[in-house]
Amino acid sequence: MTPRTEPKPNIAAARRSTAVEVDAMTQRTDADALFNQFVSIDLSNRKAKAAVEAVIGKGRARFGNGDYGVLTAVGETDDDGYPVTVTVTLRDDTGAQVPGVPYAALAPAVAGRR
């Protein structure tokens, strides 16, 4: 009889499939937006503006409306599990949840804007 061997787990694949919720321990730079923290949305990014306007209405995304919120969920991820798109809950009169916002279009909110 030959001994039964179990297949080795694919650690790299498991890491890729796990979404990273960026916090102080996993952020790559100080410019990374952190989960459950206030963020600014760069509305000059066409994909970010389109995602916001898809929820609050075309032409309504501008400075002071749809450009500020809280990073609440991971959408798509890259091979490392780092977010590519996220969901942001807006902190304006709508309070809408906006899925599909590019993570690259977010930055930590400036102090005093809360």
Image (spheres, helix red, strand yellow):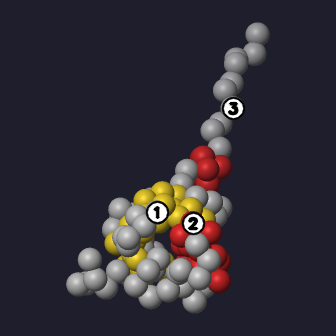
Local packing at callout 2 (Cα closer than 10 Å; few below 14, some 14-19, many 20+) is some
**In the image, what residue type sits under mark 3?**
Pro
- Per the image, the residue denoted by label 1 is 96
As helix, strand or loop, the secondary structure at mark 1 comes to loop
Point out the frontmost of discs 2 and 3: 2
Q: Which label's residue is closer to the chain start, 1 or 3?
A: 3
- Per the image, the residue denoted by label 2 is 55
Name the image quarter holding residue 47. bottom right
- Residue name at image x 53 percent, y 80 percent: 60
Contact (CB < 8 A) between labels 1 and 2?
yes
Q: Which label's residue is closer to the chain start, 2 or 3?
A: 3
Task: Return the x and y of residue 58 as percentages of the image width and height.
Answer: 62, 77
- Residue name at image x 28 percent, y 83 percent: 113
| Numbered mark located on residue 7 in the image | 3
Name the image quarter holding residue 35. bottom left
As helix, strand or loop, the secondary structure at mark 2 comes to helix
Pick whichever, 106 or 112, lies toward us: 112
Name the image quarter holding residue 32. bottom left
**In the image, what residue type sits under mark 2?**
Val
